[in-house]
Amino acid sequence: MICCYTGLLLQRCMKADPRIRTYPDIGEFAFGYLGRIFVSVFMYLELYLVAIGFLILEGDNLDKLFPDTKLIVGTVSIASKQLFVMLVALIILPTTWLRSLSVLAYVSAGGVLASVIVVFSVLWAATVDGVGFGERGRFLNLSSLPTALGLYTFCYGGHAVFPTLCTSMKDKSKFSKVLLLCFITCTLNYGSMAILGYLMYGDSVNSQVTLNLPTGKLSSKVAIYTTLINPFSKYALMIAPVATAIEERLITVNKRSPTLLIRSLVVLSTVVIALTIPFFGSLMALIGSLLSIIVSMMLPCICYIKIFGASQVRKVELVLISGILLTGTLVAITGTYASLKEIILQL
């Protein structure tokens, strides 16, 4: 509800000036050039880390399908998970060279269908392939609450693209209805998977439920292969804004920009980090706690108050926004600490 409300705040901020078309534009309108820089840094860092998460996701699931795969080069042996991360990056690399990603945008829309297929595949594994619903975990685990809240925020953190989506709509007045429908749909999808994972595996559920599914079953293969589709279609969309920002900066400085080299180096950097920090759940929790909280919860509230002024905002809404900022600060601090601690312990 908080993320849906802050999405509506972004729409109100856009109405303040017809020249506002993107999230950084809102930051600049509220706080000047430094506001644009601040918003852009958190946006691009979030997208960059999500791309890294995609590589980790691919490596984990392909390792589940082909666990004994390895590559020996001289005296060096590359394990299956690391090998698959590098192979996936090589396959994805040419898609990042495309300047126009309109085709990939249409392909990525299939992610909605893919998410539904994964849920039904997991349900099939439980009801038909013999997994059942016999496990029970702790109903409330307070020690993991900060990490969980970071993950929840990550799931609902699409605010970086909300202004762009609103700008592209033929009838912008329907943005609020579209936003509400999307949040309801996502909640039903996320809730279904959460309940299934809890009833099927309890506390032993992995950061990716596909890693729990029994090997050799058709439902497991459908779920894993479907999960593999999204990163292939979305990785380039995540990296493109980051690479474009670097290219535009170099053009400003040097009047020219080696596009292929820059994008290849950006992909290479994500591979290196994915191999260094191969912990999908912890990385997603870190992104949610540190970046998604700021981009999706705190910045919309701060920009809204700055643009319209505290005196122009209703008292009830001002109290609500103050509560969101306080909640966001607490979740950001505790969630970032918890996720960083998990990553350090797993290294």
Image: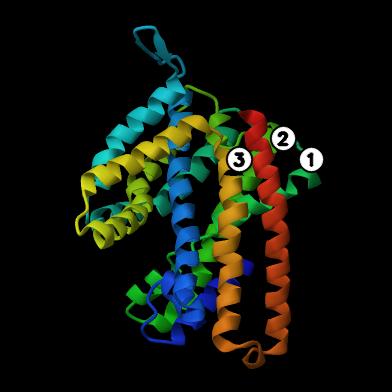
Identify which amino acid the numbered label 3 is placed on. Ser
Which label sits in the foreground, 2 or 3? 3
Left or right of 61: which side holds 100? left
> Between disc 2 and disc 3, whose residue precedes?
2
The 10 Å Cα crowd at callout 3, few under 14, some 14 to 19, many 20 or more, is many
- How far separated are the C-alphas under marks 1 and 3? 20 Å
Residue beneath the point at 24% across and 55% down: 103
x, y percent for residue 142: 80, 47
x, y percent for residue 283: 56, 42
The residue to which callout 3 is attached is: 282
The residue to which callout 1 is attached is: 138
- How far separated are the C-alphas under marks 2 and 1? 7 Å
Residue beneath the point at 37% across and 54% down: 242
Answer above or below: position of 330 versus 309: above
x, y percent for residue 97: 23, 47
Identify which amino acid the numbered label 1 is placed on. Arg
Residue 259 visible within the image:
yes
Looking at the rendered structure, the secondary structure element under dot 2 is helix
Q: Are marks 2 and 3 in contact (CB under 8 Å)?
A: no
The residue to which callout 2 is attached is: 203
Identify which amino acid the numbered label 2 is placed on. Asp
Outermost front residue: 253
Q: Are marks 2 and 1 in contact (CB under 8 Å)?
A: yes
Looking at the rendered structure, the secondary structure element under dot 1 is loop
The tag on residue 109 is none
Q: Name the image quarter holding the C terminus.
A: top right
Residue 3 visible within the image:
no
